[in-house]
Amino acid sequence: MPVVVMEYRTLGICGPKVPTICFGAYPIGGGLGTVDENQAINTVQSAIESGITFIDTAESYGTSETIIGKAITGRRHEVTLATKLSGSDHSDTHIQSAINNSLKYLKTDYIDLYQLHSPQPKWPIEHTMASLIKLKEQGKIRYIGVSNFSDLQTKEAMKHIVIHSSQPRYNMLFPHLEESTLDFCKKSGIGVIAHSVLAKGLLGGKYSPGHKFAVDDERRLFNFFRGQLFIDIHAVTTKLSEWAKSHQRDIVQLAIAWVLANKAVTSAIVGMKTIDQVKHVTKAADWKLSRGELIEIHNLIGGLQPSWIKDPTV
């Protein structure tokens, strides 16, 4: 597969340069249904060869860390590797155990970006950050990020250590939910790695009302894939699909391009389970939406227009 020239953006202030599309490892870990291990390994390697050299996983993503470790054997130097501390235990003992397990599964001696998967108020943030500082001093991690933190929670964490990245949910269906966080990160020099870019598949162009998910697919439990809410969302995504087709693209590529049009975003995390999906997703990297097109899309979606579309300086 020919190497695609991918745009790179700097993660935070003085952070690593990463491609604008990040390989999301949640699906290959089994969260959205079982994936054959060899298929998963081949998918990761195909992504790397396509220029998607930024990989995001977490200790809680099933078998994903083990799969990635096998996929990057002999080519660790080619990738920027991010993983996350999951769960509610932010004690120093657990953090040390968690990082050592991640290093073992990923077959590496350092993590480029280590992130807190979610805020855990019962653990004082200064104690958690002290543990991460220790990991940095030990050479086990290089940069520190947060995931699913509000702007206020991120601001509190910044009092104790340099935060290079934030990982909020951000997609074209529900953009207003994280606007304040993206605005804060942009002003604070924090890179944004957007997750749920395809809204768990709502923006995948594959599912229609009445679809039944397999028992090993967590989406069978999600409200937005049920009843009238799913019907309403599907009506919007159908319009978006038609708009994308009129531009010789599809809704998956549109969803990625839309997120990347916001310059507060450093990279868009996209889950991929097959080589064909990698090839397809990679094509979104060169789609630059104009301000006029963004307004057209907004009108199709409805709701409040994001401020970054209105502001000509962003």
Image: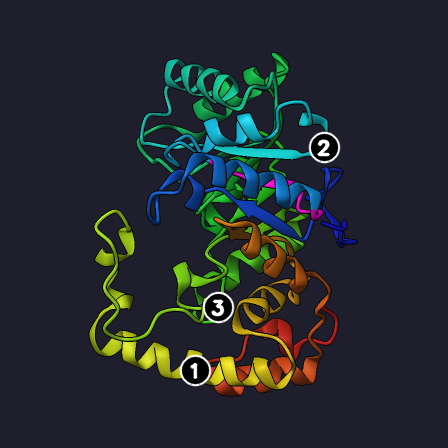
Answer with left or right where residue 268 lies relative to residue 214: right
Disc 3 residue type (three-letter): Pro
Residue holding disc 1: 238
Mark earlier in primary sequence (2, 1):
2
Mark 3 lies on residue: 175
Q: Main SS of the magenta segment? A: loop
The foreground one among 29 and 187 is 29
> Residue shown at 67%/34% (left/top)?
79
Cα gap from disc 2 to disc 3, whole angstroms: 32 Å
Secondary structure category for the residue under label 2: helix
The reply to whether the magenta stretch includes residue 128 is: no
Range drawn in magenta: 50-57
Residue at image location 57% in from the left, 46% down from the top: 23
Q: What residue does disc 2 label?
A: 78
Q: How many marks?
A: 3
- Per the image, is 52 magenta? yes
Q: CA separation, marks 2 and 1?
A: 38 Å
Report the residue at 56% width, 58% height from top. Answer: 182
